[in-house]
Amino acid sequence: MSAADLLRFAARALTGHRLRSALSLLGVAIGVAAVVVLTALGEGAQRYVTGQFAGLGTNLLIVLPGRTETTGAVPGVGGVPNDLTLDDARALARSVPGVEKVAPVSMGTETVSHRARQRQVAVLGSTSELLEVRRLKLARGEFLPPGELDRGDAVVVLASKAARELFPGEDPLGAVVRLGDSRLRVIGVLAPRGVQLGVDMDDAVILPVATAMRIFNRRSLFRILVQVRAHAEVERARVAVVALLKERHSEEDVTCFTQEAMVATFGQILGALTLAVAAIAAISLSVAGIGIMNVMLVTVSERTQEIGLLKALGAGRRQVLAIFLAKALLLAAAGGLLGVAFGAGATAGLVGLYPDLDARPPGWAVGAALGVAVVVGGVFGVLPARRAMRLDPVAALARR
Amino acid sequence: MIRLERIARAYDVGGRPLFALRDVSEEIRAGEHVAIMGPSGSGKSTLLNVLGCLDRPTGGSYVFDGREVADLDDEELTRLRRHQIGFVFQFFHLVPRLTALENVALPLLFAGLPPDQRRERARAALEAVGLAERATHRPDQLSGGERQRTALARATIMGPRVLLADEPTGNLDTVSGRQVLDLLERLNGQGLTLVVVTHDPGIARRAQRVLVLVDGRVVRRVPGREAAGVAEWFASAPHQAGDGP
């Protein structure tokens, strides 16, 4: 009996009970579709997040005070980390080779008000360099003025939402807002940017770093963003930054990581999540396998007589086994293919709804889901097939 | 062709053996036409199943064409059934979803013949039983007689040495039954060994020999022309094993 004959015979047998075959096939299809859709979404999310990071600027070093890695030092001996100061920022800009721009950042939240309108916003103190380092775009007016870091001009740039809320229907340029105890003149408004990594970048105000540090009464910066000229120089610059700050602070008390490292970390986390979700979806495939087994067992007991007949006509034990295994595999494979089609369709539908999400079924997931479906069909088909193989032809034929 | 020696077939019923066949010794020559008669439960079908290698006897020796069947493994038994033995059943046992042609071709499928050869031979076999134009009909579109003739074409397509028929006309009207019997006799005339289980003396009469089974034993052997007497003898009284006239 050739493979083609076997498959044709099995397929004919399956179409003999269409509804039941279709239902068990549907079970597999749903499982496979779930795997396909969930992995497509997971990978889409991964691409989305890394895209967002790329939007923050590339070739970026981020310096923050304190060490995230433990040194094994006795607590207390290492002491409180030194402040990350404006002088540090200045030194970085001056002495580290390959550095293009340095943007010190001080950060806090404060209430900003204009006449009777008040709003709690994120307050970013920085310099004119921030515009390019974080890829911000101005809608109107101008950004922070370039110049000495210490110059604490009483000016502010409003992000789009803050501007809209504080000045509904008005032109904020030139107006004076109150931030804490200070009065600041609005010199610019940013273009909308949207939520980035959970922070609403549109609900913020940006002012000169010295002004911000005075308002918050802080001596240490929140972090220093360093833009390196070329991608190849990023790692060398990172080492230089750490070395320089170690020298200035007489100990290594800062953390400096690359934007890339962060992207990679996020990528890893999302990749692990995608796998976990896909694994959960794959469990539904094994449930579908039980569905196949059920159908096959029903078929075996329903077709007892036919199996006996086939044996009387000269079908060998192995042929009977092969016929029933082929049935299970056919069900699983057809269900798998249907599931891939379902999954691809559903993914396309979701992308239609959320065009930002670049979701497409990953090839590895499609292959794995199909493979698992067929393996499941085989595994759960063995028991019924063996039962069919062992049927006593006499007993089988005797039933009428 | 077939030699049975002290064949027994026992079933375990509640720990006690129940004999469907006991001590059956018989010889059937190649080309012979033998009828098996007996009341229901006498072991006729069991004997036929043993002859067809569907059932293994629990005792005794069965030699088919010079080979001891008990010594054959599963694979060899399957081949024996496929190539040497044909079956015809009272209830036809056609596969309902397959056409007449596909039903006839089934043994060829298991024998591994390529599709075009299968079609050709199955068509010829259907033609031989006068059903060429019914080839693409499914069993539920065929009359009882046509179904049994299809089954007969299927049983003989491998060119077997022995044809075993279990009440082949039991579900047919007189005319269809006669057609089937004529076909069986024609095949027998061509040298096919024919064993027919029946309770109809009109059918048994056509055989050369009639074996009468009661309680799993062959109690009488009579020539076919005396089959009517066997039926009368059944009707006359309850019988004890072995108390033949």
Image (cartoon, coloured by chain):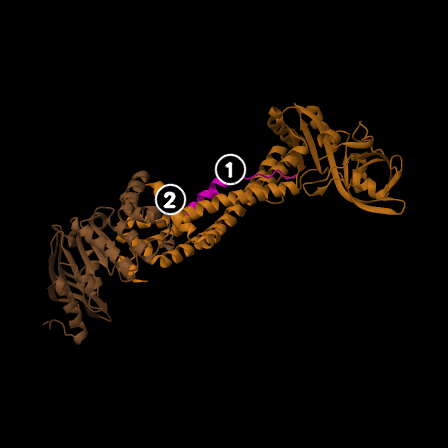
Chain colours: A orange, B brown
Residue at 38% across / 44% down in the picture? A8
> Looking at the image, can residue B142 be seen?
yes
Instruction: List the residue tagged with mark 1.
Output: A363
Horizontal and vertical percent for residue B1?
12, 52
Q: What count of labels does the image hold?
A: 2
Residue B219 in the figure: left or right of residue B177: left
Q: Chain of mark 1?
A: A
Q: Between B61 and A168, which is closer to the camera in this rendering?
A: B61
Q: Between B5 and B134, which is closer to the camera in this rendering?
A: B134
Magenta extent: A356-376
Magenta span: chief secondary structure:
helix
Badge 1: how crowded within 10 Å, few (<14), some, or many (20+)? few
Examine the rendered structure and indicate whether residue B35 appears above or below residue B239. Answer: above
Badge 2: how crowded within 10 Å, few (<14), some, or many (20+)? some
Amino acid type of the residue tagged 2 in the rendering: Leu
Q: Quadrant of residue B197?
A: bottom left
Residue A50 in the figure: left or right of residue A27: right
Q: Quadrant of residue A181?
A: top right
The mark nearer the N terminus, 2 or 1, is: 2
